[in-house]
Image (cartoon, grey):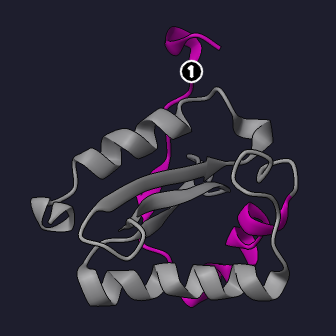
Amino acid sequence: MDSQNRPPLGEFRVPTYADIEVVLPFYTDPVGREFLGGAVSDTVGIARIGEGIRLWDERDFGPWVVADQAGVVVGWGGLSPYCGGPGVEVSYQVKPSRWREGYGRASWITAFGMRSSAWG
């Protein structure tokens, strides 16, 4: 889909524990995780989602839930500490059925537009 025919994107929002059920497939789906180290168990996925939610309280940045204009969750990603050090990593995942619609690029743009406090 070229950029002129691409639908406008929805919202990027801070996740809550109520989002666990809709975010969990981003950790457990083998297709979506093919290039990200593979799928993990529900237990590991839930723990990682919890870590991401807590980042917002502890550091005022973290992953976000990406929803389309209808409110359907299509992605998950954002900023996280890189390997526990002072660096910051940008990461994102988009449902395979929604690839090539601009959500990955929008995730990068959103991450780089965040307050500089996230960058060190």
Looking at the rendered structure, the number of numbered marks drawn on it comes to 1
For residue 91, side relative to residue 59 (left or right): right
- Left or right, 104 with reference to 22: left
Q: Position of residue 55 (x, y in %)?
A: 38, 82
Q: Which residue corresponds to the image point at 43% horizontal and 59% vertical from the top-left?
A: 78
Location of residue 117 with respect to 59 vertically, above or below: above
Nearest the eye: 107 or 43: 43
Residue 35 placement (x, y as % from top left): 73, 45
Q: As shown in the figure, which amino acid type bears the numbered disc 1?
A: Arg
Examine the rendered structure and indicate whether residue 80 appears above or below residue 31.
Answer: below
Q: Residue drawn at (34%, 81%), measured in percent from left and top? A: 56
Q: Residue at x 50, y 46 (%)?
A: 10
Instruction: Assign the N terminus to one quadrant of the image.
Output: top right
The residue that appears at 44% across and 45% down in the rendered structure is 107
> Looking at the picture, how far across and down is residue 99, in whole percent?
69, 33
Residue designated by label 1 = 6
For the residue pair 43 and 13, the one nearer the viewer reads as 43
Quadrant occupied by the C terminus: bottom left
Span of residues in magenta: 1-29
Vertical placement of residue 35 versus 44, above or below: above
Question: Relative to residue 68, is residue 83 depicted above or below?
Answer: below
Q: Tell me where residue 3 appears, x and y as whole percent.
A: 51, 14
Q: Secondary structure at mark 1?
A: loop
How dense is the environment of label 1, judged by Cα within 10 Å: few (below 14), some, or many (20 and up)? few
The answer to whether residue 78 is magenta is: no
